[in-house]
Amino acid sequence: MSEKEVVKKYSNDDLTVVWKPGMCIHSKKCWKGLLQVFNPQNRPWINMEGASTKRIMKQVDECPSGALSYISKETKTETEMSDEIKVEALENGPLMVHGALKVTNSDGSVETKKRATAFCRCGASANKPYCDGEHNNIGFTA
């Protein structure tokens, strides 16, 4: 039986940012791009009052793993990728697959991924086939 997925939500008057830490590959794009909102030194680490809703949405859209998404209170729908599937090899990092897909694990279980999925390329992930950011600790280059 798999563990229950951890999901955290942070809201302002217009937007809810959804964070799924188990999907995070620690690319640092969120906090390097908008430290006023995404600051790993703070608790909670997401401050929804740190920037405009539009700016927060723009930064969340840059999350390569899909660990960050948002729900607009106006539309009440979560951000999703288009039906197009895009594969991208990140420099010194994971293989990113953007778009909706079904992943069949080695034990035969099937998972549906809706936005972006980071697959391990370095071989060191403790969460295979997914990236857990371990490439940063082992000096992986590719």
Image (cartoon, helix red, strand yellow):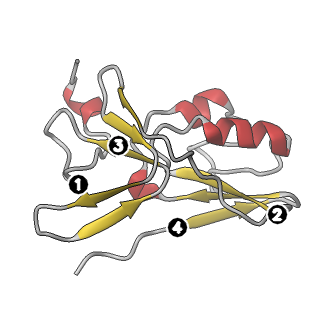
Characterize the local packing of mark 4: few (<14), some (14-19) or many (20 or more) Cα atoms within 10 angstroms: few
Query: Which sits earlier in the primary sequence, circle 1 or circle 2?
Result: 2
Q: Residue at x 56, y 50 (%)?
A: 68
Instruction: Judge depth for marks 1 and 2 and give the one in front.
Output: 2
Side of 82 where 49 appears, left or right: right
Query: Which sits earlier in the primary sequence, circle 3 or circle 4?
Result: 4
Q: Residue at x 23, y 54 (%)?
A: 127
Q: Amino acid at mark 3?
A: Ala
Residue 139, how many percent across, how many down? 22, 23
Residue hosting label 1: 127
Q: Amino acid at mark 4?
A: Val
Instruction: Judge depth for marks 3 and 4 and give the one in front.
Output: 3
Query: What is the distance, in whole Å, between disc 1 and disc 2 at their CAs?
Result: 33 Å
Q: Secondary structure at mark 1?
A: loop
Q: Secondary structure at mark 2?
A: loop
The reply to whether dot 1 and dot 3 touch (C-beta < 8 Å) is no
Q: Residue at x 54, y 31 (%)?
A: 29
